[in-house]
Amino acid sequence: MVPFGGDAADDGLHQRGPPVPARLSTEHPRWAPDARALLFVTGTTRIYLLEVPSGRVRFLTHGHDPEWSPDGRLVAFIHPGPEWQLGLIQADGSGRTLLARIPLGLRGGLTWDPRGHALYVVDRAGQTLVVDVRDGKVRSAGIPLPVERLVCSPDGEWLALIAASGGDGAPGGVYLYRRRDQELIPVTPVAATTLAWAYKGRVLLALNPATGEYVRYDMATGRTQHRRASDGLIPLVPSPTADELLHDSERAPGALLLGEIGGNRLRSFAHGFLPAWSPDGEWIAFFDSEDEEGSLCTQSRNGANFTRWAGTAPDPPLRERLVNLAIWGITAVVFPGLPALAFTAATYAFLPGTGAWRLPVLLLAWVLFYILYSVGLRGARQIADSFESSLAGYLLALAPAGLLAAAAATTALSLSLYWLVPLAAVWLAVCTFGATALTCRPAGSRRALVAAWVLTLAVTSAAAALHLQRRPAADPGALTNANTTAPLTTPVRQEDR
């Protein structure tokens, strides 16, 4: 199946089953081929399986974009991480294996061959690849044009695909590719974003929710019917029988309407998001809210038998909780703990006085600074985006570092405050070119920003050492000597005279 764009749910009549985890709000649930289970993704990379008859929820594996095999025994998924690995796992949670790496990354999701022997994927360059699930070997599918996404026909003979366009990045036209003789047939120039087979492969549907256009292509006659949704409606998901289509409302997002394809008679179905039809076309699964606490719901196409599966997230697996706890602890110490400690040591010399309470107060101030600084980085990036310049955001993010280095140098060298602004400007220029040269990364990158702060720490530490050398040492006996050298005079009483 290919993820459909859209939304779908209604106030529940009853609720049952164990809690369903908080979800990733960009992925549709996936029905099993026998419509007795649902896959959904939560917590960004946790795949769960919901057994619809019993309501039992099981953690399956870590990953995203899961897809059922045609026989419902296996689940293919994309393993989380930078290497873009394809994974495979049994529906009962056993036999997890990693099949192959796709070095260039992937576009869209996964598509099974109807025989269950291979997976079709599209890499970032638009090349269609075939991954053999038995040995993990990857080969080219031989499609002679760059592809945005594709879906395989139920009999495996045809691949319906959306061609990648050239310059503007919008999807290109829709094509059919016959695997047997490698024939490429244009279907429509409509810039579709969603493809779906219906009537057991006899009808191909192509939709563009953004424009409201959808196309119905008859495989037997080659006839193409172009239609457009009514004003204010967004076409979302066609039924597997190609007789009905779910719409969303532009004025009231989440208000799902169901009606005949090409007809004007629509009826309110539910309020919810990210709908998905069951393979037999009798049920629709959706989330009742677009936030991460939305509940997974199911309802029959006639509006009856509504069930909301409870929305409170169960605990993640124990190993994941322990790993998350360790990562959280390390993160709390390293950021902002270590930078705050380093800059406390570098700036403590500039504090007047030697009170013991000044050190923890300064450390706390630096911790609060780095916490607020991480928030300020987002604002700097937004301002940079408005100016379409990453350098502007980089300079805004480094402004505190420039002021710190300039203030330390001004104090250590006993310069006038008029030098503060020129020194800050010079230091920003040094950080802009020096940090990028050290890291071999552009000025707006995170590595360059970290390198600039490390350089600022070095300059501040050097200024603190110089300041300690130039500051005159206090003579503990000065006050005593001053008191002892003062002449002692005793007032003479009048009687003594």
Image (tube, rainbow, N blue to C red):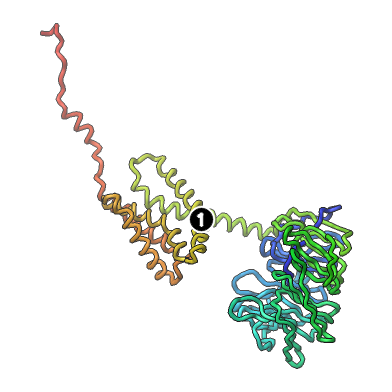
Q: Quadrant of residue 143?
A: bottom right
422 and 353: which is toward the camera: 422
Residue 246, position as x, y percentages in the image: 80, 66
**Residue type for callout 1:** Ser
- SS state under label 1: helix
Residue drawn at 67 percent across, 86 percent down: 139
Q: On the rendered structure, is 331 left or right of 359? A: right
Where does the image place residue 269, in percent across and percent down from the top left?
Answer: 83, 60
Where, quadrant-wise, is the N terminus in this rendering? bottom right
Left or right placement of residue 458 versus residue 220 in this view: left
- Quarter of the picture holding the C terminus: top left
Up the image or down, 496 lies above or below 464; here it is above
Crowdedness near tag 1: few (<14), some (14–19) or many (≥20) residues, C-alpha within 10 Å: few
Residue, disc 1: 374
Question: For the image shown, how many numbered marks are present on the structure?
Answer: 1
**Residue 159 lies in what quarter of the image?**
bottom right
* Residue sitting at x 38%, y 63%: 431
**Where is 259 relative to 337, above or below?**
below
Question: In the figure, 111 relative to 458: above or below?
Answer: below
Estimate the x, y position of residue 77 in percent, counting from the top left.
Answer: 71, 72
Nearer to me, 256 or 448: 256
Find residue 69 and report its horizontal and vertical position in percent.
Answer: 78, 75
